[in-house]
Image (cartoon, coloured by chain):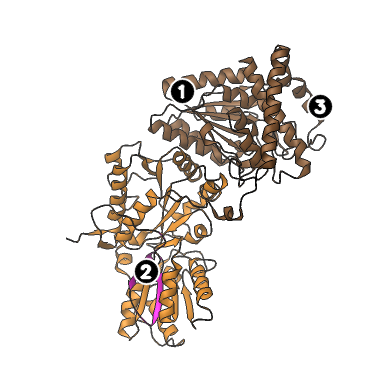
């Protein structure tokens, strides 16, 4: 019997199953024991596994990341939780200079199996320092893996895979995804990295949606169907390693590519995906490409400007329509705010 | 213990003197930060530890690597960039590692190894392993936020970690009192509730006794941490084989340290025949290690791409 649970419950279940299976798994972060702060993703884990394995931390992102690395050197598999990806900027030295490089720099003598859970995303006026999607900063660094699952199924499988992986993994969770429901098996399973998922098949255009934008791409796909456009929606799931083959295969078929990111465009994941697709298909297939993401400004808090800052399903559908009809911008579906955005209230 | 102290001190001094001699040949094509003058701290600390204990050092860690029992041949080969080096030639002098001997990888970014030592200590406490973790850093590392974050957490969780600040008075060329309002590094540890003391004069015996006692307490009480500020002096330039007196520090400042050289003091206390035997053995070992490094192959081109990620 299919079991429908939320993305947040899927993450909690993955953590519980791995902590029960492997006593070396520990979970910490500022507020990590508190289900309210973690959107329900840590539930009653502290009660189940004790305060030595699930614990709150000082507000020391840099130090605690180094502590996670050191603990992993001694055989633990830490999950380090961050309420906002913005806070990872305080830990860049440990992530980039130590975690990413240790295995190589020490000739394979050590490995750093840590998971850094980072919450990104829009919602309820989070503003310039509480909403950034900085995954592309980490995609740039050899030695790191970066995953951004969209479905509850992939959230559970990717988190288990992240915990079992012997390398540092940046696990990107969009705040709005926590409320998304989907089919999740009760048993433990892994979703391999480096394998994109085709969420919807189509023939006229390829929509690549990163993290929450995959949800908006699916909504756009429904709207496009109403005007006779068949869109294929691809969720990369893992950004590094990146399954460019699956994206290339889709674009070879459709001839059109729109990449929609939960981040900025300049040097971003969308730039990387389009560059790789262009390099692979040049001389073979005439393609048209566009990309969407944050507007090139810091994120404002006030609602009307925040709406302009982010891509959404309507904007995606409109741009996709233009790509298919050679820049004819005559159509855009009626604006309709996503239900999870309407329902969400802060302050976390 | 005297012979053991002398053996370790002499080995480090002579290895680094040979490195300084080889350096102008450009066979060692990466930065070296020599510990000459500071060896007593490494020897005093490591002789007080067990082989199963671990040390986290930093880019000036030839001394700690050797004092903790790190493989000399692999170290020399690493400096030469050879495939037989302790990091397969990919790390160099600043990134020495010998996990089997408890020398965890050393970092070239000041202060970054401190939290890793604390994290390691958290793990061994959770795993109920009888291991003491030592974190070594210079007076420059005290300026970094990671130092304070690490001390705070180590004390909060009562972790079995011994902090060793090798205070040689300079962060590269910057004097301590151009960076700190007070010369009180050890007192900073105290405000985190960590028992701390300053040990003057590069005194090997005092360092050894203090660390031995601290390690015993940490093992029996399963609680920590402890902090020692060891005052020492670097004889060579910050990086490279030369000297830099007259540039930012006067020769007169070095004179008392060279006069009180621990190697010389301890050597004079030894029976001359025993001393000669120790020295001859080490000279042969160094000769063999340099030959090993010279004759070892460079890594294959394909090595560029190995070990970026750990594969199962």
The answer to whether the residue labelled 3 contacts the one labelled 1, judged by CB atoms less than 8 Å apart, is: no
Which mark is on residue B252? 3
Chain of the residue on which disc 2 is drawn: A
Dot 3: what SS? Answer: helix
Look at discs 3 and 1 and give the one toward the viewer.
Answer: 1
**Relative to the observer, which residue lies in front, B240 or A285?**
A285
Q: Residue furthest front?
A: B295
Q: Earlier in the sequence, mark 3 or mark 1?
A: 1
Residue at numbered disc 1: B218
Residue at 52%, 45% in the rendered image: A108
Q: Where does residue A98 sit, x and y in percent of width and height?
A: 54, 46
Q: Where does residue A60 sit, x and y in percent of width and height?
A: 48, 43
Residue at 37%, 69% in the rendered image: A214
Residue at 54%, 40% in the rendered image: B146
Above or below residue A306? Residue B97 is above
Chain of the residue on which disc 1 is drawn: B
Residue B58 seen in this snapshot? yes
Residue at numbered disc 2: A214
């Amino acid at each position: 019997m299919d079991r429908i649970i939320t993305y947040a419950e899927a993450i909690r279940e993955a953590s519980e199953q791995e902590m029960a299976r492997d006593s070396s798994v520990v979970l910490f972060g500022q507020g990590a024991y508190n289900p309210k702060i973690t959107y329900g993703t840590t539930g009653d884990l502290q009660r189940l596994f004790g305060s030595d394995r699930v614990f709150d931390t000082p507000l020391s992102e840099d130090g605690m990341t180094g502590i996670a690395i050191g603990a992993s050197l001694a055989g633990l598999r830490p999950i380090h939780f961050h309420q906002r990806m913005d806070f990872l900027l305080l830990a860049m030295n440990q992530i980039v200079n130590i975690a990413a490089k240790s295995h190589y720099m020490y000739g394979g003598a050590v490995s750093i199996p840590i998971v850094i859970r980072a919450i990104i995303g829009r919602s309820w006026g989070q503003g310039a320092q509480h909403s950034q999607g900085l995954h592309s900063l980490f995609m740039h660094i050899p030695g790191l893996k970066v995953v951004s699952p969209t479905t509850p199924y992939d959230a559970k499988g990717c988190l288990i895979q992240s915990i079992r992986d012997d390398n540092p993994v940046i696990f990107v969770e969009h705040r709005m995804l926590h409320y998304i429901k989907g089919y999740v098996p009760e048993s433990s399973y892994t979703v391999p990295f480096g394998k994109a998922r085709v969420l919807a098949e189509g023939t006229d255009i390829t929509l690549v949606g990163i993290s929450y934008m995959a949800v908006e791409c699916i909504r756009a796909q429904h709207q496009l169907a109403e005007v006779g456009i068949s869109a294929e929606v691809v969720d990369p799931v893992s950004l590094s390693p990146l399954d460019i083959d699956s994206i290339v295969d889709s674009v070879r078929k459709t001839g059109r590519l729109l990449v929609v990111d939960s981040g900025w465009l300049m040097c971003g994941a969308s730039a990387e995906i389009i560059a790789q697709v262009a390099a692979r298909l040049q001389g073979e297939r005439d393609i048209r490409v566009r990309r969407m993401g944050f507007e090139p400004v810091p994120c404002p808090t006030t609602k009307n400007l925040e709406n302009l800052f982010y891509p959404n399903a309507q904007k995606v559908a409109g741009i996709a329509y233009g790509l298919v009809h050679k820049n004819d911008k005559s159509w855009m579906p009626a604006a309709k705010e996503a239900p999870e955005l309407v329902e969400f209230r802060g302050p976390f | 213990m005297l012979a053991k102290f002398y053996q370790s001190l002499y080995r480090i001094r002579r290895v680094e003197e040979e490195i300084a001699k080889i350096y102008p040949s450009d066979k060692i094509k990466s930065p070296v930060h020599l510990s000459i003058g500071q060896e007593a701290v490494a020897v005093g600390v490591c002789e007080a530890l067990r082989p199963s204990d671990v040390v986290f050092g930093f880019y000036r860690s030839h001394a700690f690597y050797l004092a903790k029992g790190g493989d000399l041949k692999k170290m020399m080969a690493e400096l030469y960039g050879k495939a037989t080096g302790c990091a397969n030639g990919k790390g160099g002098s600043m990134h020495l590692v010998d996990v089997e001997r408890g020398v965890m990888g050393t970092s070239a970014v000041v202060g970054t190894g401190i939290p890793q030592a604390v994290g390691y200590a958290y793990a061994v406490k959770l795993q109920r392993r009888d291991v003491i973790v030592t974190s070594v850093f210079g007076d420059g590392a005290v300026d970094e936020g990671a130092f304070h974050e690490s001390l705070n957490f180590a004390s909060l969780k009562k972790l079995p970690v011994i902090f060793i600040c090798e205070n040689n008075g300079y962060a590269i060329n910057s004097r301590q009192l151009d960076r700190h309002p007070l010369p009180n590094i050890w007192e900073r540890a105290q405000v985190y509730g960590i028992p701390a003391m300053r040990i003057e004069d590069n005194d090997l015996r005092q360092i050894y006794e203090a660390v031995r006692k601290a390690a015993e307490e940490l093992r029996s009480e399963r609680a920590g941490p402890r902090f020692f500020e060891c005052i020492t002096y670097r004889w060579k330039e910050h990086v490279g084989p030369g000297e830099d007196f007259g540039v930012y520090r006067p020769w007169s400042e070095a004179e008392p340290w060279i006069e009180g050289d621990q190697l010389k003091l301890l050597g004079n206390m030894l029976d001359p025949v025993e001393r000669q035997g120790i020295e001859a053995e080490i000279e042969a070992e160094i000769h063999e290690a340099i030959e090993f490094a010279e004759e070892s192959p460079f890594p294959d081109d394909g090595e560029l791409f190995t070990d970026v990620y750990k594969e199962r």
